[in-house]
Image: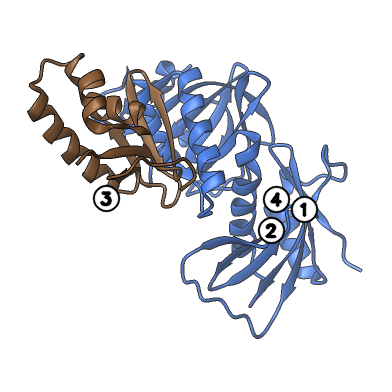
Amino acid sequence: MSLYVARSPAVAARALDGEMIVMSTRDSTLFTLNEVATEIWQAADGRTPLEGIVEKSICAKFEVEPDAALRDAEDCCRRLAARGILLISEQPIVSGT
Amino acid sequence: MTPDVVVEIGGTAVRLSTEDPALVEILQGRYAGFITDHPTTVALQLKLHSVSDLVSGADDVRVTRSDGLWRFERSDFVAEWSPDTGQGTVRQALPNPYSIDTVLRILHSVVLAPQRGFLLHAASAIRNGRAFVFSGLSGAGKTTISRLAPPDVTLLSDEISYIRLSGDRYRAFGTPFAGELAQSGENVSAPLEAVFLLAQGPENRRDPVAPAEAARALLRNILFFAADPGLVELVFRSALDCVSRVPVWRLTFVPDPGVWEMIA
C-alpha cells in the first residue's frame, strides 16, 4: 500500500542557508528538518507516492539502499505527522482537505 | 473632562482615554518621551475603565480573536479591540499602569505583525546612526550591556525592542518598555546594523551566527501572545527575513565597558 504525504497547511516554512525551518502556526513549535526530511518536505505534494519521492529525491541524491530509505522515510513522515507538520494518507491528498 | 494620553511607539499611536485624572498623571509620567499631540498616523484608541466586577478566566496572558474582535486578558485586566475600527476598551479591577503596559505590548505585537515587524525580548541602542539589538532571555545581560554603554550611545530599550521593516531595511525604534534599568528608551529610531545574541563569559568576543541558528534564537525571543495562525506565520516570515538581511553575532562578554568596542 502506497503512502502519500502533503505539507500541513498549519505551518510556515522557509529554507535558510540550506536548513529547512518549519513552525507550527497553531502552537508556534519550531522544527529544523535534516537533509532527508527536507527533501521529503519539498516533494510532499500529496499526489506523489512516498516510494516515488524516495526514489527520485532521496536515492538519487544520497547513497542509500531503496528499501532502507523507504523504511526510514516512512518513519520520518509518521514522526512529522505526529507533530502536525505533515499529512499522511493511504490515498492521494487533495489540497484543502 | 480629563485629557487623552496619546502614546506613539514605532509610528503607531494609541490614544488612551480615562475619566481618572490620577491615572492620566501616572500615564503621562510613565510614557513621557512617547506622548504626542500630533501623532504621525491615525491613533488607535483604548478607553480605560475601572470596574469592580472584573471577570477573567486567565491567570497568564491570553490573546484570542473572535468575530473580528481581539480579546486580551489576564487576571488584572480584560481588553477588547477591533482592528476594523481601531477602537477598544480596557477594563481593570484597579487603575494599574502595569496592566496598561501589558495591553500596549500585546496591541503593538498584533499591529506590528502585518507591518513586517515584531517586538523582541532584547535591549537595543543607537551609536553613530546605526541601531544594535542585544537579545537574550532574563539574565543574559540585556540590562548589563545597557548599563555599560558609553555616553554617546542612545538607549532604545533595555528590555523590549521594537523592530520593523522600513523601506528595504529593518529599523529599530525606541520603546518606553523598561526592564531592570527602570528607564524608558529614547523615542528615536535607526537602521538595524546588527543583532547580538548575548552570553556572559570570561572574555569579550563576538562570533558569527549562521542564519538558521540565528532565526531559531530570534524566534525564541520574540514576544507574541496571539494564538492566531495567520499572524504567527507573518512573524515567522519577518524573523527569518530579518536574519537573512541583518548580520547576527554571538556576543560573549565580561561586564566591562570595553565590550562596546566590539559592538560599534
Q: Residues within 10 Å of mark 2 (few under 14, many from 20)?
A: few
Q: CA distance from mark 3 to mark 1?
A: 37 Å
Image coloring type: by chain
Q: Which amino acid type is marked by label 2?
A: Gly
- Say if mark 2 contacts mark 1, CB within 8 Å: yes
Residue B68, disc: 2
Q: Position of residue B149 (x, y in %)?
A: 49, 29
Q: Which residue is mark 4?
A: B31
Check the residue under mark 4 and report the chain it is in.
Answer: B
Q: Position of residue B175 (x, y in %)?
A: 62, 41
The outermost residue toward the bottom is B53
- Say if mark 4 contacts mark 2, CB within 8 Å: no
Q: Looking at the image, can residue B50 be seen?
A: yes
Disc 1 on helix, strand or loop? loop
Q: Which residue is mark 1?
A: B84
Give the color of chain A as drawn: brown
Q: Looking at the image, can residue B162 be seen?
A: no
- Residue sitting at 21 percent across and 29 percent down? A51
- Residue sitting at 31 percent across and 38 percent down? A5
- Say if mark 3 contacts mark 1, CB within 8 Å: no
Q: Which residue is mark 3?
A: A82
